[in-house]
Image (cartoon, rainbow, N blue to C red):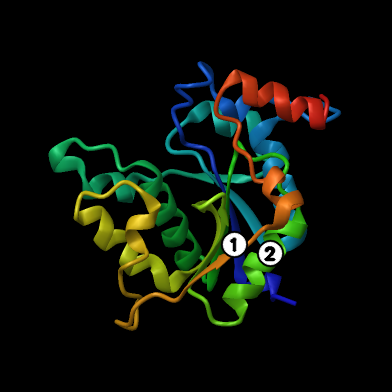
Amino acid sequence: MADRDVVLGVVLAGGRSLRMGQPKALLPFGPDGQPLVDWVARSLEPLVERVEVAAGGRAEVARALGGAFETFEDAACRAVAADEGRNVGPLGALAAALDRAEALGYSAALVVPCDMPLVTAAELSPLLEAVARGADAAFYRVEGRDQPLCAAYSVRCVRAAHAALERGQRRVVALLDGTGADGRGLRVQRLDPGEKSAGRLMNVNAPEDYDRVRAIYPV
């Protein structure tokens, strides 16, 4: 069993939601119609010592949480690319999460995007177990594609994340070929979710996705 006391749970909620046409983090979900970001944050609580939300400067996300969870921005990561005016994308959000975990004294971060409401402990616990056994990063590979935004990361990945940002990268997979804080290559574990869990690893990117998850778990 992974030691939950050394893990920071982070919900990634700073995306622009272009395909949805409205902030995904604020969509109602579950029997009480709570904001999607709140639903996902609460699903992490049994698995980690503390849950925070990477809000990416979105004040509406913090307001939706009503003080129930601490939020933080990725300002430090944005500063990496400020001279060129680049958006640091998902990699910047992950780097911010790892920075936050390290600053608070945690050895790992369990990150989940706010648009993945069907994920349960059955999917998340194996990720934590993999990192507890020595992996630097653990995530699922679904239909031949890595899912690195629903993952567990050791804070040893901080160096690789920032190095990838400085190279102008925005995608999370760019850090995987980097080196950890000890200078060695990162140990990455890709897990097979199985058919049932693969269905729960779906993202709510567009209105039709939202309709699908509500059909599975009605508001």
Mark 2 neighbour class, 10 Å CA radius: few under 14, some 14 to 19, many 20 or more: some
**In the rendered structure, which amino acid carries the disc numbered 2?**
Glu
Mark 1 neighbour class, 10 Å CA radius: few under 14, some 14 to 19, many 20 or more: many
Q: Position of residue 74 (x, y in %)?
A: 39, 46
Q: What residue did someone put label 1 on? A: 8
Q: Position of residue 199 (x, y in %)?
A: 70, 43
Choose between 218 and 37: the one closer to the eye: 218
What residue is rendered at 75% in x and 77% in y?
1
Q: Image quarter for residue 127?
A: bottom right
Q: Image quarter for residue 210?
A: top right
Q: Position of residue 191 (x, y in %)?
A: 60, 65
What residue is rendered at 61% in x and 19% in y?
207
**In the rendered structure, which amino acid carries the disc numbered 1?**
Leu
Secondary structure beneath dot 2 equals loop
Q: What residue did someone put label 2 on? A: 49
Choose between 87 and 6: the one closer to the eye: 87
In this view, 175 is above or below 145: below
Task: Please tell me which of labels 2 and 1 falls first in the chain.
Answer: 1
Callouts 2 and 1 close, C-beta under 8 Å? yes
What residue is rendered at 68% in x and 59% in y?
124
In this view, 6 is above or below 167: below
Secondary structure beneath dot 1 equals strand
What residue is rendered at 35% in x and 41% in y?
89
